[in-house]
């Protein structure tokens, strides 16, 4: 796990992108609605493919990839469209742009992770990504959240454990590990399943109504994943 000095510049770049995407996602979501934030943030696979076209020699942009990613994104939009709040669009425009910037940061971080993980062991990259990021978040907390009380409840502790162990731990580690072997464009398209699965789980566990938009959106996401990963 010990950092090699020559790895420090690359690890700093990854950490800065992680900090930037976390901050912009939280701030942007605060200024817009959750559904709109989900739709704009789900565009990050498109940024990953665009950056990968220039940074990854074996992962060039093709018409089939573009069609597949756009198809999957349309599926997400169709699924979440009924949840969009009506009102003046300009009210949420600033937040939408900030969330879009967060998607850009994440797409670039995934692309550079694919590049760096060829030389940096995936577990070490994840450890130092967090090791370099956490002090920055502590400083921001001290500046902006000083004096605010923290309520330790079962729900908050469960949420912290889920975000820390499952999302930041297991999921980050798996993604970083598989990026060593597989093309970034073929992996990130599966992220379009996240908002769709959220709607499907709400139907399954919260007994929400299964609508035609959910079925159509899920079909489009599946079609997009198939197009991006289809082999000759």
Image (cartoon, rainbow, N blue to C red):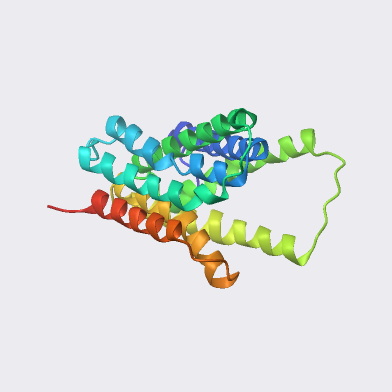
- Residue 216 visible in image: yes
- The vertical placement of 81 against 197, above or below, is above
Query: For residue 140, what is the image quadrant?
Result: top right
Residue shown at 28%/33% (left/top)? 53
The answer to whether residue 128 is left or right of residue 23 is left
Q: Position of residue 61 (x, y in %)?
A: 24, 36
Q: Is residue 32 left or right of residue 180?
A: right
Q: Is residue 2 above or below residue 14?
A: below
**Rendered location of residue 109, percent (x, y):** 44, 38
> Could one spot residue 1 in this view of the protein?
no
Which one is in front, 47 or 6?
47
The answer to which image quadrant residue 209 occupies is: bottom right
Q: Position of residue 114 (x, y in %)?
A: 35, 43
- Comparing 144 with 112, the one in front is 144
Q: Nearer the viewer, residue 35 or 230?
A: 35
State the residue in front, 141 or 33. 33
Taking the spot 65% from the left edge, 30% from the top edge, the residue there is 91
Q: Position of residue 14 (x, y in %)?
A: 48, 37
Q: Residue at x 47, y 31 (%)?
A: 9
In the image, residue 17 sits, relative to residue 156, either above or below, namely above
């Amino acid at each position: 796990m010990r950092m090699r000095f020559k790895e420090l510049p690359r690890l700093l770049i990854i950490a800065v992108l992680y900090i930037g995407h976390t901050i912009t996602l939280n701030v942007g979501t605060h200024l817009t609605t959750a559904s709109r934030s989900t739709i704009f943030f789900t565009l990050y696979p498109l940024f990953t493919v665009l950056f990968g076209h220039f940074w990854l020699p074996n992962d060039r942009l093709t018409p089939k990839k573009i069609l597949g990613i756009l198809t999957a994104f349309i599926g997400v939009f169709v699924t979440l469209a009924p949840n969009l709040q009506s009102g003046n669009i300009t009210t949420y425009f600033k937040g939408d742009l900030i969330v879009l910037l967060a998607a850009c940061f994440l797409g670039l971080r995934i692309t550079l992770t694919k590049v760096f993980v060829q030389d940096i062991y995936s577990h070490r990259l994840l450890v130092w990504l967090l090791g370099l990021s956490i002090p920055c978040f502590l400083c921001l907390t001290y500046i902006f959240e000083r004096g605010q009380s923290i309520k330790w409840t079962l729900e908050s502790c469960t949420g912290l454990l889920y975000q820390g162990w499952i999302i930041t731990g297991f999921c980050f580690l798996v993604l970083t590990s598989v990026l060593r072997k597989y093309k970034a464009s073929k992996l990130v398209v599966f992220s379009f399943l996240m908002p769709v699965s959220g709607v499907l789980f709400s139907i399954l566990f919260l007994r929400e109504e299964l609508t035609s938009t959910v079925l159509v959106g899920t079909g489009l996401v599946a079609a997009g994943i198939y197009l991006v990963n289809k082999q000759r």
